[in-house]
Amino acid sequence: MSKQIINTDKAPAPIGPYNQSVKAGGLLFISGQIPIDPATGDLVSNGIKAESKQCMNNLLAILSEAKLTFEHVVKTTIFLSDMSLFAEVNEVYGSYFNSDYPARETVAVKGLPKGVNVEISMIATVAL
């Protein structure tokens, strides 16, 4: 099986030994995105809705680079610093999909990279 690395400068550069996404076996695996503005490299930290929107926009940039959309997404994972943020994150997240939502889990974790409140990863199919 071959794999293809897909990165874009329209999403934050990886901050470790990984890629933004890897296409393999008919799927695109997108690494967790935190609320970093790729244009400035700064963390978006003016509220959980803004943070969530930046995560989703970073994911959209990677999907777009792979010539995919949120319609191709089959699985997501949302990591939160606290489950009390769930409703606001869920509202922003849901606004990026039309219907046919992907499978998903949302978990609260002890800590996230750079001390952010939300990180979202996705798996997308390359064919519909």
Image (spheres, rainbow, N blue to C red):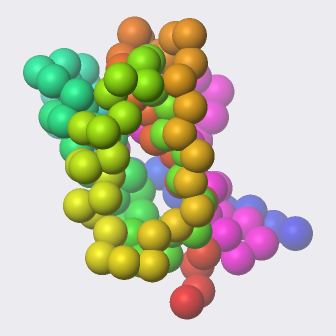
Taking depth in this image into account, of 35 and 19 the one nearest to the observer is 35
Q: Classify residue 96 as left or right of residue 27.
A: left
Pick out the residue farthest to the left: 46
In the rendered image, residue 73, in percent from the top left (x then y), is placed at: 51, 68
In the rendered image, residue 117, in percent from the top left (x then y), is placed at: 36, 20
Write down the quadrant of residue 34 in the picture: top left
As drawn, 21 above or below 83 = below
Count of marks overlaid on the render: 0
Residue drawn at the location 53% of the way across and 39% of the way down: 106
- Residue 56 seen in the figure: no
Pick out the residue farthest to the bottom: 128
The N terminus lies in which quarter of the figure? bottom right
As drawn, 113 above or below 85 = above
Taking depth in this image into account, of 113 and 84 the one nearest to the observer is 84
In the rendered image, residue 60, in percent from the top left (x then y), is placed at: 33, 59
Q: Is residue 22 magenta?
A: yes
Write down the quadrant of residue 5 in the picture: bottom right
Q: Which residues are magenta?
A: 11-33
Residue drawn at the location 12% of the way across and 21% of the way down: 46
Pick out the residue farthest to the right: 1
Residue drawn at the location 43% of the way across and 25% of the way down: 83
The C terminus lies in which quarter of the figure? bottom right
